Amino acid sequence: IYSIRTIGNDGNGSISAVVAGIEYAINQHVDIINLSLYANKTLATTVLEKEIQKAIDAGITVVGAAGNDGADAVNYVPGSVLDAWVLGAADDNGNRKAISNYGDSVDYYAKAKYTSNAAAMFSGYISKYGTDSLDNSIFLMMKIQNLMKRHCLTLLLKNILKEILTHLIHK
């Protein structure tokens, strides 16, 4: 485990510092990079998007926060990097928190105060169990719940999916 600090205690930092941190992690051949941070997608953040994709292309799992602005995560980095694992924040009932960014680029919502906490928890989970375990995990259930809410499936289909999930989780 490497601790590569790229932002200050106040949560602020430069894009170049984050890019340098990712480059260092790539050179150290890490398995997972946790980006419990987010930034508005701008021309300046394209270099960060490319660095994140470079890490993914090198075989590194990149986990990032969706952001806490209650907006579409695709307009933020790392949410705009579709190959990254992007996490939103959910309440105790598994519902997306109003502050959590959302959208098709968000892979899962985890019970957390902020999306940065959700990304950190997810990084810890896959560090311990790997990404293959996601098929039989609570994260899968949250993903399907998110899809059901987003696409307004019928009550019958919801009940069928709940039964399947209950069976998978209690296997």
Image (cartoon, helix red, strand yellow):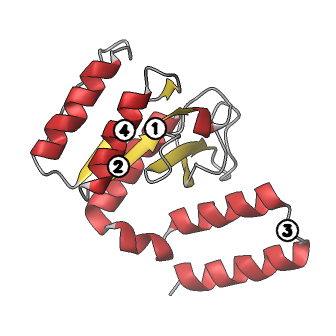
Question: Could you tell which of marks 1 and 3 lies nearer the N-terminus?
Answer: 1
Q: CA distance from mark 1 to mark 2?
A: 9 Å
Tag 4 near tag 2, CB within 8 Å: no
4 or 2: mark nearer the eye: 4
Provide the residue designation for mark 2. Answer: 62
Question: Could you tell which of marks 3 and 2 lies nearer the N-terminus?
Answer: 2
Tag 1 near tag 3, CB within 8 Å: no
Q: In the rendered structure, which amino acid carries the disc numbered 4?
A: Lys
Q: Secondary structure at mark 1?
A: loop
Q: In the rendered structure, which amino acid carries the disc numbered 3?
A: Leu
Q: Is residue 8 above or below residue 112?
A: above
Provide the residue designation for mark 3. Answer: 153
Question: Could you tell which of marks 4 and 1 lies nearer the N-terminus?
Answer: 4
Provide the residue designation for mark 1. Answer: 78
4 or 1: mark nearer the eye: 4
Q: Secondary structure at mark 2?
A: strand
x%, y% of residue 167? 60, 86
Name the side, left or right, on which 164 lies relative to 32: right
